[in-house]
Amino acid sequence: MINKINFLNILFIVIFISYISASNIKENGNNVHYVNKSDDFSITGEGNNKNWEKAEWIELTKRKQFEKTPLRTTVKMLYSKTGLYFLFNCQDNKLTSSMNADFMELWNEDVVEVFLWPDENYPVYFEYELSPLNYELPIMVANIDGELLRWQPFYYESNRRTRHKTNIINGKKEPHAFIEGWTAEFFIPYTLLMPLNNVPPRKGEKWRANFYRMDYDHPESISWLWQLTKVNFHDYKNFGTIIFN
């Protein structure tokens, strides 16, 4: 009986350690996240599709640890035959967001951001931003020794367009509304990323990536990120790694 109990205890410890290791993987000091494959599905802004059960939440951390805020930011990611899916959950107190069109400088207000760098041989990556008011900024960035050359998509229509929606938790979707949080759900088709190499991804392939959120409720903005960067959000050499399952 004692041996059986000991065996069960050891088995539990092994399973627990395996779970922790799978959820907090690091490679050469960088965060690593395994992205599961999914069927294509509709975007609602609430992240209530059952396919999201296949993805684990990634907890983003504050860029400056001394920033005193209990607010949390988490993100999920999936991939399909046609593109990439993302779901952000942002705890918030106020919508500091007033821009009312796509392709504006959304990073100056509340926003979530995804950076995707599929090929480490070239300093070119894709940046996507979405505001809580559901306005987007998709751009390609060439980072030449810190000089950023940004390109917006041309003939941005049909199967090259993203799909995106946001949802406000306990509040109105309007500038400066008091809320409890917001979610952002969006789909980035491979056809929009095709100028980049290694697109679409194959099983087992590795991309570099990072996830961010900016909040401007206070005089000094607060930012969250997945992989800590040394310089700024465009410090692509210090991005984390995503591996496609």
Image (spheres, rainbow, N blue to C red):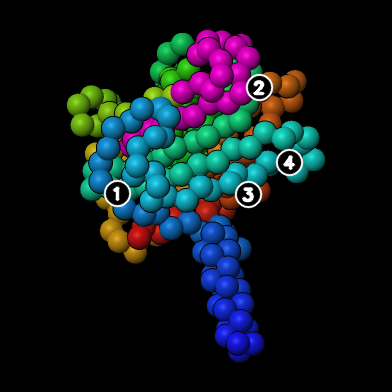
Q: SS class of the residue under badge 3? A: loop
Single out the mark in the foreground, 3 or 2: 2
Residue 146 appears in view = no
Start and end of the magenta stretch?
167-188
Q: Is residue 137 above or below residue 53?
A: above
Which is nearer the N-term, disc 3 or disc 1?
Answer: 1
Which is nearer the N-term, disc 2 or disc 4?
Answer: 4
Q: Which quadrant would the C terminus be assigned to in this image?
A: bottom left
Tell me which amino acid carries mark 3. Answer: Leu
Q: SS class of the residue under badge 2? A: loop
Q: Is residue 43 left or right of residue 66?
A: left
Residue contact between numbered discs 3 and 4, judged by CB atoms under 8 Å:
no
Q: SS class of the residue under badge 1? A: loop
Name which residue lies at 26% across and 25% down.
156
Which is nearer the N-term, disc 4 or disc 1?
Answer: 1
Distance from disc 3 to disc 1, alpha carbons, whole Å, reads 28 Å
> Furthest residue to the left?
158
Tell me which amino acid carries mark 2. Answer: Asn
Distance from disc 2 to disc 1, alpha carbons, whole Å, reads 33 Å
Residue contact between numbered discs 3 and 2, judged by CB atoms under 8 Å:
no
Distance from disc 2 to disc 4, alpha carbons, whole Å, reads 19 Å
Q: Which residue is mark 4?
A: 64
- As for residue 182 lying within the magenta part, the answer is yes
Q: Which quadrant would the N terminus be assigned to in this image?
A: bottom right
Q: Which residue is mark 3?
A: 228
Q: Which residue is mark 2?
A: 93
Q: SS class of the residue under badge 4? A: loop
Tell me which amino acid carries mark 1. Answer: Ser
Q: Which mark is residue 110?
A: none
Counting other residues with Cα less than 10 Å from the Cα at mark 3, is it few (<14), some (14-19), or many (20 or more)? many
Locate residue 111, reporting x and y percent: 54, 27
Q: Which mark is residue 38?
A: 1
